[in-house]
Amino acid sequence: MTTAVIHTHSLGKEYRRNLGAPSGLLRDSLARAFRSPSSLFRRERAEKFWALRDVSMEVNEGEVLGLIGRNGSGKTTLLKVLSRITRPTAGWAEIHGRIGSLLEVGTGFHPELTGRENAYLSGAILGMSKEEISRKFDEIVAFAELEKFIDTPVKHYSSGMYVRLAFAVAAHLEPEILLVDEVLAVGDIKFQRKCLGKMGDVARAGRTVILVSHQLTQIRRLCQRVIWLDGGAIRNVGPAAELVSSYEAAMADNALDDSRPAEGRCQFIRWKLVGSNRTSDHILPGDGETSVSFLLRVNEPLQSVHHGVALYDQDRHLLWGNALDGVTLDPGLHEFCYTLPFLPLRPGAYAWRAAIYDGGIAVDDWECVPPMQVVTTPVTHYRDEAAGFLNIPSKLEIFPASSK
């Protein structure tokens, strides 16, 4: 039987925002008084808005829960309420267990203290004893890669050094519940992958994790269940793979942009997936035969030009490309359709690029929108840094080897 360690009921958080709040500078106040003396006695206009509204949920012990949604949907506010940083305006939250929070870079760090001192301070804030922190301290420093700077005041740290130490402390001091916001984007790619590997270790150790991330591939890989927040309210709850796919479809529909201006000699104006292996024009659900079409609007005759196409991942690695020289096209619409027998990509967002060049000069070079979303189930290594680019299934057999 699973035990709920977080239970919220009708949780809400209301804020006030000023409308046209005046500057606090003396010169601006004097100028305002000169123009309208009565303005000094007017109250600032403000309006109320709900950053969270009627959020009821349960998170079970050992569960890894993902929070997704557009910027401003309430994800960070929810984590701040659960962390007791912010008091809710309505409703309540019941939490069983020691919480570790990584919501903002260096939250709780004192700039005048060294990295060593801040590690102990942060651990104490998390409720750890000095002995517990000392036992984990060498692992924290090694993970953060700050051996040479651990006795330097953190006010001299870069943002990347801040987040490395903050994440290392939060992940190694073993709180029962770990809340992680979109802070890993501050580090470099290598450290992000290292952090995600550690997150996987934390999850497999049976601790409860709530993860906010716009890296939907990581949400798929790490989370069993996802809550989709929209406008401060819960829009949907469900299994990670299913719900992330729905979210990606909604975002892809909102990102459509087929209105490139009809100027110059030609423009690519649309791309889409065609054929049976798709669930929409821009979502690829599997790794079977894939066909992709690029629609080119030709305004002036093109004689013996060069056409190129490329596919990139989110880190701008070139995954595939092709080209054709000697292309001649009359004015009008022309469809370029590529068919690949298989495209075994891991889940995530990918970007197409289509181009026409004439004599080495770009006639049109389009970063295609919206991105292509791949929603297949990952079948590679469970650590992202060891999984590679391709989502190729494999079969392993282990048997006694011959002594010959």
Image (cartoon, helix red, strand yellow):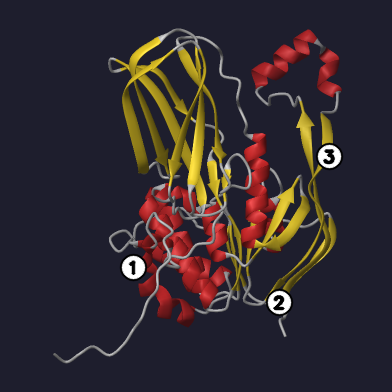
Of the two numbered discs 2 and 3 on the same chain, state the one appearing first in sequence: 3
The three-letter code of the residue at mark 2 reads: His
Image quadrant in which the C terminus is located:
bottom left
- The residues bearing labels 1 and 3 have C-alpha atoms spaced at a distance of 46 Å
Q: Position of residue 331 (x, y in %)?
A: 49, 10
Mark 3, residue position = 48
Q: In this view, does 36 lie to the left or right of 308?
A: right
285 or 346: nearer the eye? 285
Mark 2, residue position = 96
57 or 343: nearer the eye? 343
Q: Position of residue 381 (x, y in %)?
A: 42, 67
Q: Is residue 324 left or right of residue 200?
A: left
57 or 272: nearer the eye? 272
Q: Where is residue 60 in the image (x, y as percent from the top left)?
A: 69, 74
Confirm whether residue 145 shows in the render.
yes
Mark 1, residue position = 142
Image quadrant in which the N terminus is located:
bottom right
- The residues bearing labels 2 and 1 have C-alpha atoms spaced at a distance of 31 Å
Q: Is residue 246 above or below residue 269?
A: below
Q: Position of residue 232 (x, y in %)?
A: 76, 48
The three-letter code of the residue at mark 3 reads: Lys
Would you call the spot at circle 2 few (<14 residues within 10 Å), some (14-19), or many (20 or more)?
few
Element under disc 3:
strand
The structure residue drawn at horizontal position 47% and vertical position 9%, both measured from the top left corner, is 264
Element under disc 2:
loop
The structure residue drawn at horizontal position 81% and vertical position 41%, both measured from the top left corner, is 49
Of the two numbered discs 2 and 1 on the same chain, state the one appearing first in sequence: 2
The structure residue drawn at horizontal position 55% and vertical position 39%, both measured from the top left corner, is 273
Would you call the spot at circle 1 few (<14 residues within 10 Å), some (14-19), or many (20 or more)?
few
